[in-house]
Image: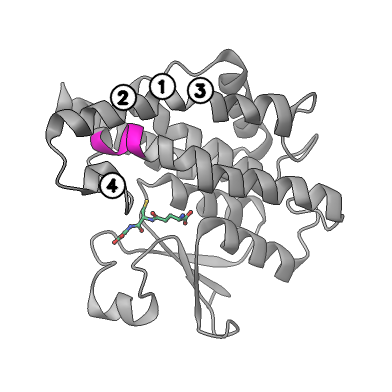
């Protein structure tokens, strides 16, 4: 029986991050597809936040852990994955900062910009979740698309800078989280700058099947929603 049970929803980039990570790290895992089951009494009993990705292991105090970045940090710590999550305080600080910046600033704009096209429910607190009229929601969505460019460029100018990846020559867990996130922008035909396209290609090149297999599920879903919309 594998060490790690990873509960996933395959079209999601939050899940893609964890799915790429366990493959890239060569961990012993089993994926459990919980599409449509995250609000069942059984799932809620384990994960009251009804979120994926979520790992289950008896070694954790409450038996479960969610939040993609926390999962990658925990498993890196547990298995001593120095390459993906270096223990040098300075290198680690940059990786942590990039992940917090992504989750706290970049992703909320990206979710507001893309979730309507993906047919995903909005993040809590988003205008899409409120009783605002459709025009107001569309205005907020367009404003989020506009707002994406600035934090996106921060990844280039600050976190990646003159290196290949946030992690340096090799991808780190922050790179896995960032590259996976960029995948969703295809659903709105976001004009990804050349550097970002090259970056995703470099990630795919560096990680091979570990990246390609989970990415295919996200890209397949985007292809499906786009075919339904046209
Ligand atoms: N910040 C979280 C976001 C997780 C998240 O939003 N998961 C969604 C899929 S994209 C989910 O599992 N939703 C199911 C539900 O709320 O019932 C992470 O990075 O893991």
In the picture, measured across the screen, residue 185 lies left or right of residue 208, that is left
| Residue 186 x/y as whole percent | 39, 26
| Residue 26 x/y as whole percent | 66, 57
Query: Residue at coordinates 37% horizontally, 40% vertically from top-left?
Result: 111
Contact, mark 1 vs mark 3 (Cβ under 8 Å): yes
**Residue wearing tag 2:** 142
Query: Cα distance, mark 1 to mark 4?
Result: 18 Å
Q: Which residues are magenta?
A: 112-116
Label 4 or label 2, whichever lies nearer to me, is: 2
The one of 10 and 1 positioned closer to us in this rendering: 10
Q: Mark 3 or 2 closer to N-term?
A: 2
Q: Quadrant of residue 75?
A: bottom right
Principal SS element in the magenta part? helix
In the picture, measured across the screen, residue 131 lies left or right of residue 47, that is left
Which mark, by number, is residue 175? none
Query: Cα distance, mark 2 to mark 1?
Result: 6 Å
Q: Mark 4 or 3 closer to N-term?
A: 4
In the picture, measured across the screen, residue 226 lies left or right of residue 22, that is left
**Residue wearing tag 1:** 146
In terms of secondary structure, where does tag 1 sit? helix
In terms of secondary structure, where does tag 3 sit? helix
Contact, mark 2 vs mark 1 (Cβ under 8 Å): yes
Query: Residue at coordinates 66% horizontally, 61% vertically from top-left?
Result: 73
Compared with 201, 39 (above or below) is below
**Residue wearing tag 3:** 149
Query: Cα distance, mark 4 to mark 2?
Result: 15 Å
Around disc 4, counting alpha carbons within 10 Å, would you say few (fewer than 14), some (14 to 19), or many (20 or more)? some
């Amino acid at each position: 029986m594998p060490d790690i049970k990873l509960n996933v929803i395959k079209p999601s980039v939050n899940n893609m991050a964890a799915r790429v990570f366990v493959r890239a790290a060569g961990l012993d895992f089993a994926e459990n597809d919980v599409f449509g089951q995250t609000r069942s009494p059984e799932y809620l009993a384990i994960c009251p936040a009804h979120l994926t990705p979520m790992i289950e292991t008896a070694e954790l105090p409450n038996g479960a852990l969610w939040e993609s970045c926390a999962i990658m940090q925990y498993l890196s710590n547990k298995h001593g994955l120095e390459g993906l999550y270096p223990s040098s305080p300075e290198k680690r600080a940059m990786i942590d900062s990039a992940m917090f910046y992504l989750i706290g600033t970049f992703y909320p704009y990206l979710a507001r910009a893309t979730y309507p096209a993906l047919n995903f429910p909005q993040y809590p607190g988003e205008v899409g979740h409120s009783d605002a009229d459709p025009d107001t929601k569309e205005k907020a969505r367009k404003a989020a698309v506009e707002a994406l460019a600035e934090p996106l460029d921060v990844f280039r100018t600050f976190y990646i800078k003159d290196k290949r990846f946030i992690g340096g020559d090799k991808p780190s867990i922050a790179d896995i989280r960032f590259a996976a996130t960029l995948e969703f922008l295809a659903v709105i035909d976001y004009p990804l700058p050349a550097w970002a396209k090259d970056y995703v290609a470099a990630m795919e090149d560096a990680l091979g099947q570990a990246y390609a297999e989970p990415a295919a599920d996200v890209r397949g879903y985007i292809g499906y929603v786009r075919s339904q919309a046209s």
